[in-house]
Amino acid sequence: MPYEYDDQNIFAKILRGEIPSTPLFESEHAIAFEDIRPQRKSHLLVIPKGPYRCYDHFVQAASASEQLDFFAAVAKVAAQAGIAESAGGNGYRLITNSGPDSLQEVPHFHVHILGGEPVGPLTAS
Ligand code: AMP
């Protein structure tokens, strides 16, 4: 089933400047900002600028340059935040929720970067 993208989601509004946010990082195809409800000391979100609903959609429909730029952005954001081991930090976890079973809340593809302290077990149960 082809993916549909609802451009009224909150991250689309952030991208259009309709909702304020403080970008921590911007590249040609991605931006990063802090999660509004941080789950760990460092909780950052990286989103592509393009209209993709989830990871699956992004990998199917985004161009190679968008994908390369996005995944490079994730690493750069973790380094900039000082949590990547290469930047002297203690590491981090990437999470991306994709679809209803994952409880994805915002239907615009995004990667959570969690760190700054021990993140804990992979899943709650
Ligand atoms: P997910 O469940 O993976 O879709 O996660 C969506 C995330 O977006 C949650 O962790 C929310 O706290 C976060 N979020 C929702 N609205 C905003 C906002 N305006 N600015 C920053 N983060 C947000």
Image (cartoon, helix red, strand yellow):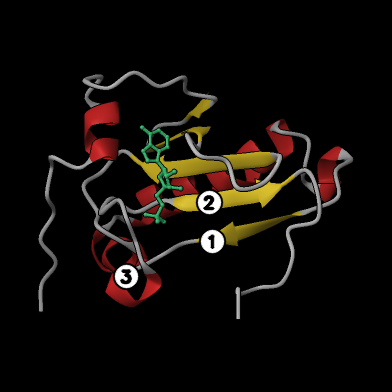
Name the residue that disc number 2 marks.
112
Classify mark 3: helix, strand or loop: helix
Name the residue that disc number 1 marks.
95
Q: Nearer the viewer, mark 3 or mark 2?
A: 2
Q: At label 2, which amino acid type do we have?
A: His
Q: At label 1, which amino acid type do we have?
A: Ile
Residue 29, numbered label: none
Compared across the picture, whether 94 is left or right of 87 comes to left
* Residues at discs 3 and 1 in contact (Cβ within 8 Å): no
* Quadrant in which ligand 1 is drawn: top left
Name the image quarter holding residue 100. Answer: bottom left
Name the residue that disc number 3 marks.
56
Residue placed furthest toward the front: 125
Classify mark 2: helix, strand or loop: strand
In primary-sequence order, the first of circles 3 and 2 is: 3
- Ligand 1 under 8 Å from disc 2 Cβ: yes
Q: Which residue is painted at 68% across and 39% down in the image? A: 42
In percent of width and height, residue 37 lies at 50, 39
Q: Nearer the viewer, mark 3 or mark 1?
A: 1
Compared across the picture, whether 102 is left or right of 89 comes to left
Q: Which residue is painted at 79% across and 53% down in the image? A: 91
Depth check: 116 or 63 in front? 116
Q: Residues within 10 Å of mark 1 (few under 14, many from 20)?
A: few
In percent of width and height, residue 92 lies at 72, 54
Q: CA distance from mark 3 to mark 1?
A: 14 Å
Q: CA distance from mark 1 to mark 2?
A: 5 Å
- Ligand 1 under 8 Å from disc 1 Cβ: yes
Classify mark 1: helix, strand or loop: strand
In primary-sequence order, the first of circles 3 and 1 is: 3
Compared across the picture, whether 108 is left or right of 85 comes to left
* Residues at discs 1 and 2 in contact (Cβ within 8 Å): yes
Q: CA distance from mark 3 to mark 2?
A: 16 Å
